[in-house]
Amino acid sequence: MMNYMRSEWYRITHTKDIYVFTGIMAAGVLLLNVGQYVCSAVIPDFRYSSVKFALSFLTGGMGALFLTGMILAMVLFSADQKNGIAKNAVAYGISREKLFIGKCIVSFAAALISMMILLVLYIGTAVLLLEGPAQPYVGLLLEGVLCNLPAAAAFMILAVALGQFFEKDSVAIVLWVAVYYFIPVATFMLGLEIPALEKVAKWMPCYYLNFEVVAGMSGYDCLWSEPAGAARCIIAGVIGIIVFLTAGILMNRRKEL
Amino acid sequence: MKEIIAATRDLTKIYGSTEALVHMNLNVKRGQILGLIGDNGAGKTTLLKMLAGQIYPTRGEITLFGAHGEKELEKQRKRIGTMIESPGFYPQMSVEGNLEYYRIQKGIPGKEKVAEILKATGLHEKRRVPARKLSFGMKQRLGLGIALMGEPELLLLDEPINGLDPSGIMEIREMLQRLSGEKNIAVILSSHILTELEQLADKYCFLYKGKVLKQISAEDLEDECSSYIEIQVSDPGLFTVRMEKRYPEQKYQVLPDRRIRILGEEIEPERFSSLAAENGIQVSSLAVKSITLEEYYMDLKRGGGQS
């Protein structure tokens, strides 16, 4: 599996995909912060040119981590089946399980590096260009990223599993959205009648990130500010990793290529 | 006696109600080149994909290098090179990049291996070109290069010379002959270009609609195909009765249009023209011919057994 991961790492670093992806995301981040800076310079009494407001986008929308993770997994591995790469790897003695786990590790490593670059750019430009104190907003954002990293990894694993199983990326993406969004919403709705399901819904990232995190000009109220909330994020993520990893292995172990 | 490195026993693959391959028993020895012959849907690719572990058999067993069972086969597949259906590579990566990717994946030390493969496949000048920009024939060469990476002991090749120009076909043929002869690599390959297979294979497996029609060594095939007499007579029934009576050991096939193919070595046409004349059978034509691989396959397909 190490050789497979090394070959994938070679491929990822020698093709444009990861650079284009990170570049586009970086352009978006710069546009956001530089846009606010420019607005503050040309619009009198522009209220939104602050670190607090700039960082609230990601702090209050941690789901973006999950979504970009899924997109990156698709970008990195969508061509595998179409181009016969997976077939070759299996023919050379790499089991489907190792192939799947290897892809998960490599894509997570690539995503982590890409994310760190983007975070440095996002926080750095906000602190350098925008007004107001950096703390506690930078701290809350970084804590949020750390606490939600296991769940982001879990949903990236889900994206890799679906991408490896379904030949069409569109099917994989629709199912990913269903698992990330529609299942928690349905569980929550049913939870209004069945209390046990409400408890389950509270452990789903889509639920707690939407209902238990607030970040904006009016203030920050983050689930992970309290140890119990942070623990819930981390435990939910770890459970997600176990569930999606197991599902991915079971789905792909007998897959015909 | 050469070691058997790939074998199947009662290998069967069924998709729903379609029998893609049934009861396949096969032995491939070290250094042997096995040619798979069959129409589209005959089961050639299905067999190769099962050997490569890309699809699972419905029934039966595969043995590679003496090992069987899923986990053991996985280990043994590191000794295999494949190009099945289409060459697998990343289109946006350069030719050299693709080879380097597989070199790392197969755990082969030394970057010089990539240069060796580039030279062997005639892709050296195209090494920096993105794979997507290669011509069809060049892509086939890249696929072969990937298959050859790591000095495999068994090559599984599905239509490897498809799309190659005549000199490319010759180069690939020579390369496969060299690998088989010098390095004792076994090759299982399918091709629609039977004249090419004829020059390469030392064993043939004829497949039709998922069933094995016949397996035969090149020597035996040569014997069967060496030469024959094709005679067209007014009454084939009477002719064959008389022939069986006079020459009981004589092999023959009855063909459409009142034609009879008389097989065997050193057969004298005069014997059969006399036989016809003696029995009042009119001979419309008589010629000494030899059977091509295509004709042999077509005969097998038609169910033309030999008596």
Image (cartoon, coloured by chain):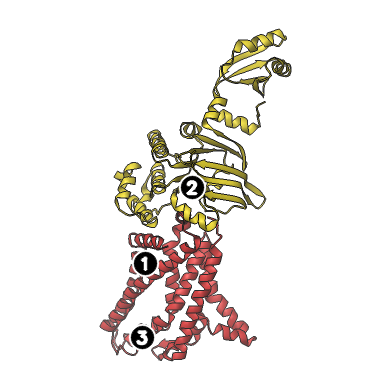
Name the chain letter of the residue that bears numbered label 3. Answer: A
* Residue of label 2: B84
Secondary structure at numbered mark 1 = helix
| CA distance separating discs 1 and 2 | 32 Å
Please state, as top left, top right, bottom left or bottom right, where the N terminus of chain A lies in the image. bottom left
Q: Examine the rendering and report whether any part of residue A91 can be seen.
A: no
- The amino acid type found where label 1 is placed reads Phe
* Residue nearer the viewer, B105 or B26: B26
* Residue nearer the viewer, B282 or B62: B62
Name the chain letter of the residue that bears numbered label 1. Answer: A
Dot 3 surroundings within 10 Å: few (below 14), some, or many (20 or more)? many
Q: Position of residue B79 (x, y in %)?
A: 44, 50
Q: Color used for chain A?
A: red
Q: Position of residue A138 (x, y in %)?
A: 33, 85
Dot 1 surroundings within 10 Å: few (below 14), some, or many (20 or more)? some
- The amino acid type found where label 2 is placed reads Ile
Secondary structure at numbered mark 2 = loop
* Residue of label 3: A53
Q: Color used for chain B?
A: yellow
Image quadrant of residue A53?
A: bottom left
Q: Position of residue B301 (x, y in %)?
A: 63, 33
Number of numbered tags placed on the structure image: 3
Residue at the image point whose x is 51% and y is 33% from the top: B194
* Residue of label 1: A21
Secondary structure at numbered mark 3 = helix
| CA distance separating discs 3 and 1 | 25 Å
Closer mark to the observer between disc 1 and disc 2: 2
Closer mark to the observer between disc 3 and disc 2: 2
